[in-house]
Amino acid sequence: MTNTTENLPVADPFVEEGGLPVIGHWIDGSLHASRSGRTAPVYDPALGRQTKEVALADESEIQTAIASAARAFPGWAGTSMAKRQAIVFRFREILNERKHELAEIITSEHGKVVSDAAGEVQRGLEVVELATGFPHLLKGDYSENVSTGIDVYSTKQPLGVVGIISPFNFPAMVPMWFFPIAIAAGNTVVLKPSEKDPSAAIWMAEVWKEAGLPDGVFNVLQGDKLAVDGLLTSPEVQSISFVGSTPIAQYIYETAARHGKRVQALGGAKNHMLVLPDADLDLVADQAINAGFGSAGERCMAISVVLAVEPVADELIEKITERIGKLRVGDGRREPDMGPLVTEQHRDKVASYIDIAAQDGATVVVDGRGIEVDGAADGFWLGPTLLDNVPTTSRAYTEEIFGPVLSVVRVDGFEEGVELINSGAFGNGTAIFTNDGGAARRFQNEIQVGMIGVNVPIPVPVAYYSFGGWKDSLFGDSKAYGIQGFDFFTRQKAITSRWLDPATHGGINLGFPKN
Ligand code: NAD
């Protein structure tokens, strides 16, 4: 069997099977139904019921998607920068005009509030905008006359087929951390989105087509571990960009590296906010709420631990508790403050940490279970939860919870706070809240974390810096987007060149050139 889409029926646009739409693959410029016979459920978390299915690719579909990207590569890499730039600009324009559609799709499968989903798309758009300037960022260097009559220059070339594997919590933004830069630089892409919210990727593929991107340059392969392993082991795939949980990130890093690929694998997090006694506690309480409960805590840059330097803990907890009382939880389409969690299973896992913390001696200040909501009774709800005096030996402290559970740990001073942060397994983001510039400066210097906020709770770098943590939050050498993104998706060549003319003919010389 050849690896072409002839074997796959075209879907229109989502095939109905057993009453539910089945989301298929986007390969070679069109949507295809799967023949694998394997699917996974897709839920509307605010309704608490399955609304769709997503195809899970089999081996032949995986190879078809990779082959489509491989066929498209020479033509796309050889397309002039001016034409490539016009297409990336057009993608940016359409996405910007229609971003509300994408936000609604995200909410219907992820659950986050629509305005927050629009914010996610906006952050992705920033990377698209960075990518529109790619000709400047792909310029090489030129040094004239490094030796008599000899010039040295460098060029940056695309890698080929690149694989992107993304998590459920940002179905539009995380893929956009990578594919605008990869495509602008001349690569072709196979994106494997999360099976929990697979539709955003298909929507973005349609926009690429409308923007004039040649077929096969951007492919979406729906699937699970089988599809991931297909990308990790394919000799055709040159690099892997992964975002997800730490155990899977480590597996991706090791497996892809063993198969000779360039890898960037971003993992989980446990982000701490260190509050010094001189901080403005109203600002801290507001920011702890925003960073702890925004997107129901399902953000890798969410704050999950407040380290309160005594004597401020009691007052801070009072302020946070008062604010929690005013938060509205409900269906993201009705613009509450916070939506549901992504699946029932995940909601139950997050809720189980409340009992774990309590059993380990923590105080449950606010329990989000059984909260009243503005939404369907069966939605995957868990209200904002606040824990105090969480022991640092408890699994509620050491593990990533990834939900609306904010823990307070009381510490005696700056040093104890820094020591706790630095002894943790993760190093994604952190923040210090203080009015003491010297302490903030020491913090940024001593902390073993990749992204740091000073009176800013979620320090996600803008598109022209790069995103990535340290330790178990990033496997590989390269962060996402920014200049590091362009370096990741290109290979450099250095050319040493001499054009003979009578003045520079050096004659025979078997040693190193000296002039
Ligand atoms: P996940 O690790 O379960 O899944 C991520 C991707 O890996 C998905 O596409 C999934 O299909 C695939 N996958 C899952 N299990 C696999 C396996 N055994 N083998 C191969 N592939 C597998 O993560 P998630 O639950 O979708 O996302 C939440 C996690 O992502 C959290 O840990 C969060 O901190 C992390 N995250 C990190 C960042 C960051 O920038 N560091 C950003 C967003 C999310």
Image (spheres, grey):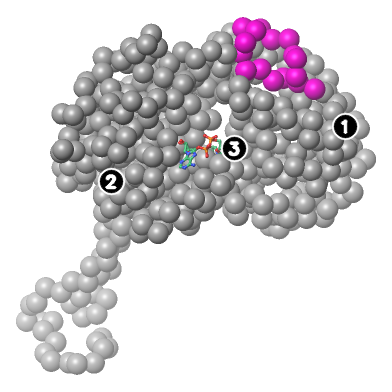
Residue lying at 72% horizontally and 55% vertically, measured from the top left: 422
Kind of residue at badge 1: Thr
Q: Main secondary structure of the magenta part?
A: loop
Residue 396, percent from left and from top:
75, 39
Residue lying at 17% horizontally and 92% vertically, measured from the top left: 509
Marked residue nearer the N-terminal end (2 or 1):
2
Residue lying at 37% horizontally and 48% vertically, measured from the top left: 232
Verify whether residue 381 appears in magenta.
yes
Q: Is residue 391 visible?
A: yes
Residue 415, percent from left and from top:
82, 55
Kind of residue at badge 2: Val
Kind of residue at badge 3: Cys
Relative to 413, residue 510 above or below: below
Q: Is residue 256 left or right of residue 170?
A: left
The residue where tag 3 is placed is 300
Verify whether residue 99 appears in magenta.
no
Residue lying at 47% horizontally and 20% vertically, measured from the top left: 42
The residue where tag 1 is placed is 363
Q: How far apart are marks 1 and 3 (CA)?
A: 25 Å
The residue where tag 2 is placed is 161
Confirm if mark 2 falls within 8 A of ligand 1. no
Q: Which type of secondary structure does the marked residue at label 2 adopt?
A: strand
Q: Which type of secondary structure does the marked residue at label 1 adopt?
A: strand
